[in-house]
Amino acid sequence: MARIIGGLTTSHIPAVGNAIHKGLQDDPYWEPFFRAYPPIRDWLGRHKPDVAINIYNDHGLGFFLDKMPTFAIGAAHEYVNEDEGWGIPQLDPFPGDPRLSWHIIESMVADEFDITSCQELPVDHGFVVPMQLFWPGAPHNADMPRTVPISANTVQHPIPTLGRALKFGRALRKAILSWPDDIKVVVLGTGGLSHQLDGERAGFINREFDRYCMDKIVDDPDELTSIGRMELVEKAGAQGTEFLMWMMMRGALGAKVVARSTNYHIPISNTGAGTMLLECTE
Ligand code: DHB
Ligand code: FE
């Protein structure tokens, strides 16, 4: 039977992809961000998950404003990374797990989540930057797991509520735990924390709100569901809605988790960067 061993969160700032490419991990500007990852990589090295469910938000590469699924799940043999114009080197394709993907899609639809299933899905920085942070050299890292990408809409309003995101994660948990193969699964929630890249509030970061979210996501994610969508935009910035990914991830982990590693750093680019390792206890 499949087991969920933990959840990982990280920002997916494109400039991080460039810093990795240029080997700037020990540079004084970058070090307080990159220091979050070695302890998590040690944990991954000890537990060696077989599959990474990567919950991210597509930013206009896989989907665009003309067609924007609320929840999409990849069901491909591999996922191709493409040039988005950020100047990050394009990575080789990431291996999928289509049998597991279809099982998850079946289970989610049976649970009344209306899923867009994607037999082809180009993956953007929201997916690949976190994979590089957790599995350096990805996709050419010997320990890198097979992947199932899940994208939720944070781009085109109306976006899902935080409550819906948490329920999605809980249904995802049920889907994974009903998979008969004896595999270990880790769930990534990528994006956030507070940031706004455009408009009058460009550069907006809310340290207090980020800290509150990082605190509550561990023991009381349900409290966060009382935050409305427009309130989320107001408090976290227009792109801080990416916190929805963290809620989806958290729902998949079960009732009780232990925070094994936590890091928060600003400024990296325009974003409050939160990194967490939440270990499952059930
Ligand atoms: C940045 C952050 C993001 O989440 C993103 O998708 C693009 C850019 C940034 O802070 O530069
Ligand atoms: Fe983003």
Image (cartoon, rainbow, N blue to C red):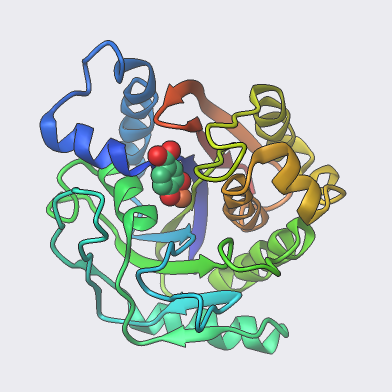
- Say if 6 sits above or below 52 in the image: above
Of 258 and 18, nearer the camera is 18
The reply to whether residue 179 is in sight is: no
Of 147 and 128, nearer the camera is 128
- Say if 203 sits above or below 173 in the image: above
Residue 271, given in percent of the width and then of the height, sits at: 49, 33
User: Residue drawn at (13%, 62%), measured in percent from left and top?
Assistant: 92
Quadrant of the rendered structure where residue 12 is?
top left
User: Residue drawn at (33%, 54%), measured in percent from left and top?
Assistant: 125
Work out which residue is located at the far top of the displayed protein and give it. 28
Residue 260, given in percent of the width and then of the height, sits at: 53, 28
- Say if 67 sits above or below 258 in the image: below
User: Residue drawn at (49%, 61%), measured in percent from left and top?
Assistant: 57
Of 52 and 83, nearer the camera is 83
Residue 26, given in percent of the width and then of the height, sits at: 21, 16
- Say if 23 sits above or below 75 in the image: above
User: Residue drawn at (56%, 88%), measured in percent from left and top?
Assistant: 106
* Left or right relative to 124: residue 108: right
> What number of labels is visible?
0
Work out which residue is located at the far front of the displayed protein and give it. 200
Residue 130, given in percent of the width and then of the height, sits at: 35, 46
The reply to whether residue 97 is in sight is: yes
